[in-house]
Each structure stands twice: as C-alpha cells, then as structure tokens.
Amino acid sequence: MSADASRSAVPSPRHGYTAAQVRAAEAPLLAAGEPLMERAAAALADEIERLIARATDVGGRPLVIVLAGSGDNGGDALFAGAHLAERGADVRLVAVGARLHEAGAAAAHGAGAVDLDPDADADAFAAAIDAADVLVDGILGIGAAASPALRGRSREIVARVLERLAERGHAERPPGTRHPLVVAVDLPSGISPDDGRVPDPTVLPADLTVTMGAVKAGLLLPPASRLAGRVVLVDLGLGPALADVEPVVTV
C-alpha cells in the first residue's frame, strides 16, 4: 500500500461520527479477534507519557490517578495504567463503580499499580489529587450515548475531585498548564458522543482527549467541545469501514 493510500485509510480528525457508526465499524474487527483494546491502551499510555514529558515538571516518579469505570472505557484506562506503571510511574486506581474491568485491573495490579479508595481516607484522597501529575478519566465511553450524565458513585467521586481542583484554582489556569492535567479516554465522561450535550455539569474538563478509532461527533460540537481540550485520534484501523459512511459533523 502506498503512503497516500495508507493515510487515506485513517479517518479524518475533522470528521465526527456517532457512537453507533463507530460501533458498527469496530464490529468486524472485534469479530476477527483484532486486539483493539490493547492497541488503544498502548497508544493512550504513549500520549500520557508525552503529555507528562512536555507539560509537567516531574522530578521523580510521575503520579497518575486512574478514575476507572467498569466497562471497556475503564479497561482502556487500566491497561494504559499498566503500561505506565511498567515504565516507572506511580499509578493509583480509583474504582468509580461497583467493580473494575477484571482483565485491566489484573494487568495494572500486576505492573505495580495500587488501589486508591476515596472513602477509606478522605484526606489521603485529597492529598493524592493535589499531588497527581495526571488524572485519567476512564469512567464512561460511547456506551453511555443514550444517557451520558454521571450518576451514583461516579458522579459523587467526580464532584469531589472537581471541588478539590476548584479550591486550588485549577480552572483559572490555561489548558495544558494545569496541575494535575486531565486526560479523557475517548471522551470526557458525562458528555454525549453524538451531539455534544452536557446534561449535568459534573464533568472533568480535559486538557487532552485521546479518542479511539474515529473522532466522536460530540467532541466537535459545543458545549462538549469546550470540555475536550486537545483531541488526539488513535488509529485502530476503522478507516476502511468508515470510508463510505457519512460523518454527522465536519469541521
């Protein structure tokens, strides 16, 4: 395949697709056993590592806190946490739901990541947020398309994080210069992937969104686009399946 043909096989970052369009493009690859989660997690870890190197002043081990849901979005975040722990980062895992993605959690724990329970010691949790170099939002992905707002424990934990960040003037700093930096996995949890709705303000504004396979339409539409930060597209090989699919947004 020529270089031009290879590039054309990658979805354009200017095109936004719905959750249903992305799922349909992923389906044949998943059926064929393609390791999409592994690819996504490795690329996510690389982007977080680049962000730390470029935008933070880390003298020792970088501290990465992973807010992980129980689904595939949390799995991506946990496997990325495993990669980062293997590379020397201090990775701490916060389960925002009833459980963690089993395989992702096993990989992260096996690499040296440790659990951080917000309820066990509120002061220790606040101190960890203060000290973190990166917060990884791996709570909800495109599976929440019908009802994107955070609920229950996940909403409570994100609200606590937002309150702590507000106390430190986090929002007043320009994106990319904040401490900690926030990296969203696929999209900031709590926004609609299809139309950019933000039905509840309990959303962690991202400095960087690492979106998988194709850009989700909601990342290109306000108000969600104002919460996404810089958007980086990870190629998972969906280009051929999306070649004849009309994006719902083009910017």
Image: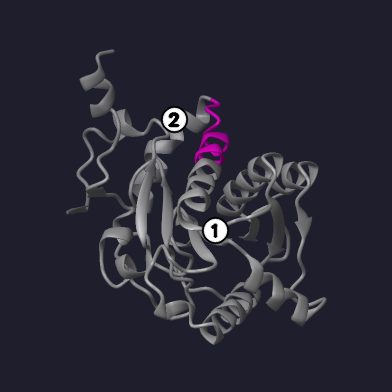
- In the depicted structure, whether residue 20 falls above or below residue 92: above
Q: Position of residue 162 (x, y in %)?
A: 54, 79
Taken as a whole, is the magenta stretch helix, strand or loop? Answer: helix
Q: Give the range drawn in magenta.
A: 33-43
Q: In which quarter of the image is residue 164?
A: bottom right
Q: Are marks 1 and 2 in contact (CB under 8 Å)?
A: no
Q: Where is residue 7 in the image (x, y as percent from the top left)?
A: 26, 27
Q: Quadrant of the C terminus?
A: bottom left
Q: Position of residue 54 (x, y in %)?
A: 46, 51
Q: In which quarter of the image is the N terminus?
A: top left
- Residue extending furthest right? 120
Q: Is mark 2 on a helix, strand or loop?
A: helix
Q: Does the magenta stretch include residue 3?
A: no
Eye-nearest disc, 1 or 2: 1
The residue to which callout 1 is attached is 57
For residue 103, side relative to residue 170 (left or right):
right
For residue 215, side relative to residue 32 (left or right):
left
Q: Earlier in the sequence, mark 1 or mark 2?
A: 2
The residue to which callout 2 is attached is 28
Query: Is residue 138 visible from the viewing direction of this image?
Result: no
Say which residue appears at 54% left-offset and 58% top-offset.
Answer: 57
For residue 20, side relative to residue 41 (left or right):
left
